[in-house]
Image: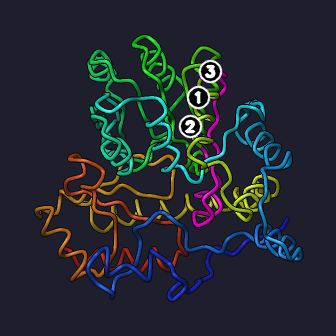
Amino acid sequence: MKEYNFDEIVPRQGSGCLKYDKINEFLGSDDLLPMWIADMDFKTPDFVMEAFAKRLEHPVMGYFYHTDEFYRSIVTWMHKRHQWNISAKWICFSPGIVAGLSFLVQTFSQKGDKILIQTPVYHPFYEVIEKNGREIITSPLQIVGDRYEMDFNHLEEQLRKGPKMMIISNPHNPVGRCWQPEELRTLAELCLKYHCLLVSDEIHSDLMMRDFKHTPVAKLSDEIANNTITCMAPSKTFNLAGLASSEIIISNPELRAKFKAFMNDTVHIFGNIFGDVALEAAYTHGAVWLDQLRNYLTDNVNYCKEFFANNIPAIKTYQHEATYLLWVDFKGLGYSHQELWDKLIHVAHLGLNDGRIFGEAGDNFMRINLACPRSTVEEAMKRITRLC
């Protein structure tokens, strides 16, 4: 079995890389260690690059279509990776998950409709709701012991207000929960009870920490699947975000027909040749690489958690079960949020994601991207000690 090297430093400066080349524009300084935007500092896998090279042997890059092999690779990956048996006809293409969420909001709600989210949560959820003229209603997650949980009593109160749609992050970005089947079932059955369409963003579904397993919401029952739209992609898993190729899985034929009509009418059905090439290669050949990546990421997360516990116990982390994005609580240091941000930028010289972009519950929190070589993680931890 091939062993992959995730310790290798891959220089990304000067490659048109948002994470490195635009850090001053977004975070206000050039001399930061970038651990913010959610892509990986690891090489795109060799089997994807080889698929690109093979396609480049053909000299024409004209119009294309999504082949049977494209759909089959998705079906097979869902079966082998998540024990979820889907049909190829359920799969709709989307040029990225955030774009797909926006299209779903436009397809299945009207201006002024309420859409429910659980906070803190991935900040584009707010944007695709507000920018499309819909109203956000929230149900905050609650901290119970050392992990985040859903507040089902409050969630039901919010569902009584009649939202047309609920968007969830499964697994959760930024708090790192791998939602368990019983949690997802309770949530999905509440959405059924109140006739609220459930949209599940499962882009991080392959990025479980060691010993954790993802549950697609739509896998739970046919009734739940009939009211659920699932958004997935290989982009986070295999570092392919620049290729804008994602799948929206809809088993309900009426919902699927309505979404496909919207995508056809707005001409968002094609994407690009290399997005398809990458998706098919990743889902066909990516299992071994992903297993090794998950182990590496789990070790990075554990290293950080142990570092904080042993060296700066005032900085707190919570049970982390999924994603390479660690949600870190700095409240114990005693700074205001702005003071913390200024010190991270000007003293630690670290570029992290400001917790406030995920909602009010992100005050004094930061999100740290740990999809990078261990040496980068170790340097980041050293820099954080400058805050004390």
**The C terminus lies in quadrant:** bottom left
| Quarter assignment of residue 24 | bottom left
Span highlighted in magenta in the image:
232-254
Q: Which residue is mark 1?
A: 258
In this rendered view, identify the residue nearer to me: 283 or 265: 265
* Amino acid tagged 2: Phe
Q: Position of residue 251 (x, y in %)?
A: 67, 25
Residue under the image location 60 percent in, 49 percent down: 268
| Quarter assignment of residue 364 | bottom left
In this rendered view, identify the residue nearer to me: 8 or 192: 192
* Amino acid tagged 1: Lys
Looking at the image, the residue that sits furthest to the top is 193
Q: Nearer the viewer, mark 2 or mark 3?
A: 2
> In the displayed structure, would residue 273 be above or below residue 224?
below
* Amino acid tagged 3: Glu
- Ranked by sequence position, the earlier of labels 2 and 3 is 3
Q: Which residue is mark 2?
A: 262
